[in-house]
Image: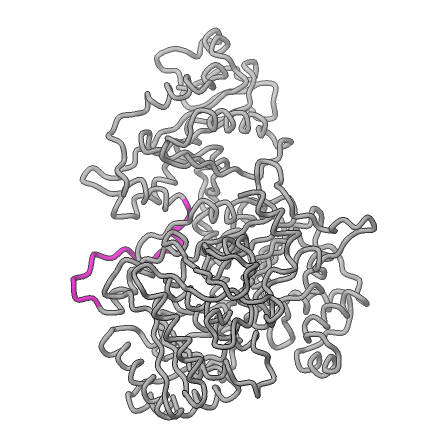
Amino acid sequence: MDFIASTVEESEPGAEAELDVWDRLKSAFGSEDYGVAYHKYPIIDKGGNRFDHEPDVVLLHREYGLVVIEVKGYQINHIDRIEGHTWYLDGISQSTAQPHAQARSQANFLRSFFVREDKLMGDRGCKIPVNQLVALPNVTREEWEQAGFDGPAAPQVITADDLTPTALRSIFESLKTFDPLDREELRAGLDVLSCGQPISGQSLPPVGEQESKADHYEKVVKGLNGFDLQQQEIGVQIPPGPQQIRGIAGSGKTVLLAMKAARIHEKHPDWDIVFTFYTKSLYDHLTELVERFYEHFTDSKPDFDKLHVIHAWGGRKAGDGVYYRLAKQSKTKFRSFGTAKSEFEDEDVEPFEGCCQRLLDYGDIDEQFDAILIDEAQDFGPAFFNLCREALRQPERLIWAYDEAQNLSSLTAPSPTNIFGTNDDGEPELDLSGQYKRGIRKSHIMRRAYRAPRSVLMLAHAFGMGLKREDGPVQMITRQEGWRNIGYEIEADFRRYGSEATLTREKAQSPHPLQDAEEANRFVKCKEFNSKQKEAEWVADQISTDIQEEGLNPEQILVIPLGPNGRGHAHYSLREALDEHNIEINCVWNNDDHKEFAKPGKVTVSRINRAKGNEAASVYVMSVEAVENENRHKGPVQRRNEAFVGITRSRAWCTITGQIEDRKPMFDELHSLISDVTSEDPEITFQVPNPQLLEHELEEDTDEYDDTALTDF
């Protein structure tokens, strides 16, 4: 049995009683029970008048179905009389209550989620039975009976005497009026309660044996999705302070931040909340995600005057942004990208980081937000983090999620100490070790990847680091613990340079919908050419096949040209080649609306900076020879990282192409890796490098927060 705690404060009305019942349930149900329990499940009927607060406890159990428990902290003298569903109260702020009716309304609201799923519907309706209970942990059975509430028409309640493990199990056993749920029914029920429906597509009937890419991709985007336990904790729990979320590419960080933003807004509609990000083209996607989750929680629309989905920079033309808003409010000079690039050209600082530091140095920042959530945090420097922190009210709910392997210049993000510094005693200004009350973690590490198939992700990591590069890796994780953090197992002795290392990844760490579909599982391939024209023509032919024969929509295809000349090759050579097939392209860099990425009916072509954060069914990474182009001003680490980001945009298939020129060793490296990762039991064998020969040793400066975070696992 899994238990997902809430962020309720013990000082809140009724909280002490709720926590008492919650802890007793945790004692009564153990690992042998199949199901999940939530304290303060995130639904509230803001669109109607059925119930005005979240269910205190929601439990789904294979044997007992769905049970909603309304907890009341009343003493026996608080209950004057009970007439039908109405309890008349005395000596407290409430004069009446309808706890059973409240629990019933909440249960029926939840039941409406179940009836949307074909797997949970049978000839007699919903397969998951629904029950309600009222718990009175401050009232004994003797007091209840002496007050005359034990007649045949009296409501069933859980009293203080019933909170022992044996007594609680006995009460739940009395609810059994049906056969236990089978594995598929329970799994579907758990997925529904995990809040997976807002990101799920319409359920479809099984397709026939002759499956195209379009048929396979339906399995990826359609049907019921569910969140795992860690994802649910991240999505629904509201930390009483800062929180860091580290995650591997495709682990769901963006979706979960949107879910958390909606959850905070549902729980605290009066709070001023910011959800911000780096890639402008994510704006519509993030706004839609927030709306979906909020409507799921409340059956109503979010108030975007209180929940602000805005870009980190912003501007007069770009629209609202965190930096733009704070600069205006502090009456400090606002710098656009062009101005900042020119002003900070001679300084060793990114333009946006320079802007934020100037605002910190010369602006007077008011505390004006109750929570700030930062997506793509790997792309921001310390100044932006500290700017956000300055704008927060206590207790500084700064929540950030980063993928340390999606930064285009590094595969790591700085530690909290490097971002926020230390105090006069040398202690971190922001301590992310341990947990908050009720077990809410200050730091999460997400190891599972859901977006890309296992072979695609393994190829991306191995090629991005150069594990089988002829001249040795350019960067690498050199600790067992570091590899485990991103979901791998490695057999290696990092002290023996030149010795053999073997890298593997279990299926459970990449639970992709198509991982067992033999017809679909040639997910990665590579082809080299003698000219850019031949490359463009072949890619155009493949795209035409994807559309005409495999049934993919043009907007489900993304082309990412690497290197300084990629834009020209894609814009001209590829456009001309696709014109021969009557296929239109959407060159993202030509779009006036920077918030728009894909366009219906057109193949998306994007440089790496705009592609980051987006995804597609079929991805073509062109001009991969740019990875070994030493004439580029970018170093080998950044060039490899760009390839990594491009490959991991794929939700199913990834094709890598390039001009062979004098790059044969690199293409040999790619073909060898593809052979490794597409085998039945994929493993990558390479030689342990001398760390001193690496361009970048990953995680070499992260001991302080890796160690503290890992104590929670």
Residue 358 versus residue 53: which sits nearer the camera? Answer: 358
Quarter of the picture holding the N terminus? top left
Label tally: 0
- Tell me which secondary structure the magenta stretch mostly adopts: loop
Does residue 296 sit above or below 653 in this rendering? above
The residue nearer to you, when weighing 532 against 144, is 532
Relative horizontal placement of residue 638, taking residue 503 as reference (left or right) = right
493 versus 599 height, above or below? above
Q: Which residues are magenta?
A: 194-211
Residue 484 in view here: yes
Among the 4 quarters of the image, the one containing residue 385: bottom right
Residue lying furthest top in this view? 146
Judge from the rendering whether residue 316 lies leftward or rightward of residue 40; answer left or right: right
Name the residue rendered at 48%, 6% in the picture. Answer: 146
Outermost left residue: 209
Looking at the picture, the colour scheme in use is one colour
In the rendered image, residue 339, in percent from the top left (x then y), is placed at 70, 81
Picture residue at 46% right of the left edge, 18% below the top: 164
Does the magenta run of residues contain 622?
A: no
Residue 185, quarter of picture:
top left
Residue 326, given in percent of the width and then of the height, sits at: 71, 65
Residue 590 image position (x, y, % from top left): 49, 84
Q: Residue furthest right?
A: 424
- Nearer to me, 523 or 307: 523
Q: Position of residue 361 (x, y in %)?
A: 80, 66
Decide if residue 710 is on the left or right side of residue 330.
left
Residue at the image position 44 percent from the left and 68 percent from the top? 460
Question: Which picture quadrant has residue 352?
Answer: bottom right
